[in-house]
Amino acid sequence: MIPYATQWVDDEDIAAVAQALKTAYLTQGPLVDEFEAKTAGYCGAKYAVAFNSGTSALHGACFAAGLKAGDEAITSPITFVATANAVLYCGAKPLFADIDPQTINLDPTAVAGQITAKTKAILPVHYAGQPCEMAALSKLAKERNLTVIEDACHALGADYQGKKIGAGQYSDMTILSFHAVKHITTGEGGMVLTNNKDFYEKLKTFRTHGITRDPKLLAEKDPGPWVYEMQALGFNYRLTDFQSALGMSQLKKLDQFVARRREIVARYQAAFKNVPGLATIQGKTDCRSAWHIYPIMVKGNRRKIFDALRAKGLGVNVHYIPVYWQPYYSQLGYQKGLCPRAEAYYESTITLPLYPKMSDQEVETVITVVKECVNGR
Ligand SMILES: *Cc1c(COP(=O)(O)O)cnc(C)c1O
């Protein structure tokens, strides 16, 4: 079976983790700071705060943005459930806006249509690694004084208008995930990038129980050296030093990983260009996708084609079931039909294998098998 995605951990990565395990720091230590600085440097952000998952990073960002009961935040239904769940964790309500059927990203016009007096944030998701229309979304947000939180869990290494996603040109915070299938991995892990010092400080205390030891921030006058204060309800969302060692070792190879992903996708795009019954995502010209996944859209019976691909050894997958279709969301009152373009996309899509370690031979096998199955052979 050719999987839809898999990590690439080599001997250098293993040596980096082994070395970290021999130090005094088994939990959060100096390597976390180093990993944050290197990732912020790579993306062109001022600050970075590491978390133990992309999900906890999203939660941190929603907390820092001040989301609370009575507030609303707008996101895409074509995302992993974690994006919308982070809004729920804060007691706020996620609203879903429909997608642009060419890019499968949030349609800024649809977002504008969902803004109410309660809206506090927009969470654009760079689906498959393709940057959203950030300039348009940022314009909307500025007019209404909304916080923009980019879910860039698919888009580490992508460019938008000549800058890396994460530089925060058009947003307040950017979320990364280091889950095994993402561009670089720490096993589980995540990060928030920001240029805003206030968000940065909130994120730092949020990931460690809402506790601060900074004498400048303590309420107690003349505190003893042991004093810490819990000033907000935070969590234990810390990343470890040995995970950070893996992350830094992986970060060295990120450009190579992204280049290989783009090379494979260029081959796919050329091969699938004129295949009847098969369409691919159309990118915008002002950005470059980092290609986390490679979804196609099929016209025929999706289930039949999917089963045929699996039967022929392709570990295909589907990204994503519209979030509000999930039973938990139905129970909250969300109904089918809310975002018709997102639903039509979901019903037609299949994610093909894509990962940097894929051989040219495997890429050709995928192409041959897809052409056969899409045409019912
Ligand atoms: C992976 C992912 C997340 C969550 O990241 P974890 O590190 O698995 O918690 C959130 N949003 C999107 C779009 C993702 O792909």
Image (cartoon, rainbow, N blue to C red):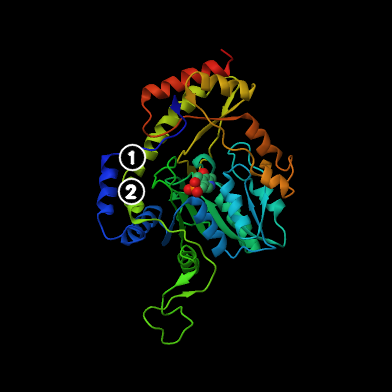
Residue 9 numbered mark, or none = 1
Please tell me which residue lies in front, 273 or 123. Answer: 123
Q: Are marks 2 and 1 in contact (CB under 8 Å)?
A: yes
Q: Secondary structure at mark 2?
A: helix
Q: Give the CA separation, mark 2 to mark 1.
A: 9 Å
- Look at the picture and state if 319 lies above or below 247: above
Residue 116 numbered mark, or none = none
Q: Secondary structure at mark 1?
A: loop
Residue at (48% x, 57% y) in the render: 168
- Look at the picture and state if 143 lies above or below 321: below
Q: To which residue does mark 2 refer?
A: 246
Q: Earlier in the sequence, mark 2 or mark 1?
A: 1
User: In the image, residue 321 lies at what x, y percent?
Assistant: 62, 38
Residue at (57% x, 44% y) in the render: 80
Instruction: Residue 45: name its quadrant.
Output: bottom left
- The three-letter amino acid code for the residue at tag 1 is Val
Residue at (49% x, 56% y) in the render: 57
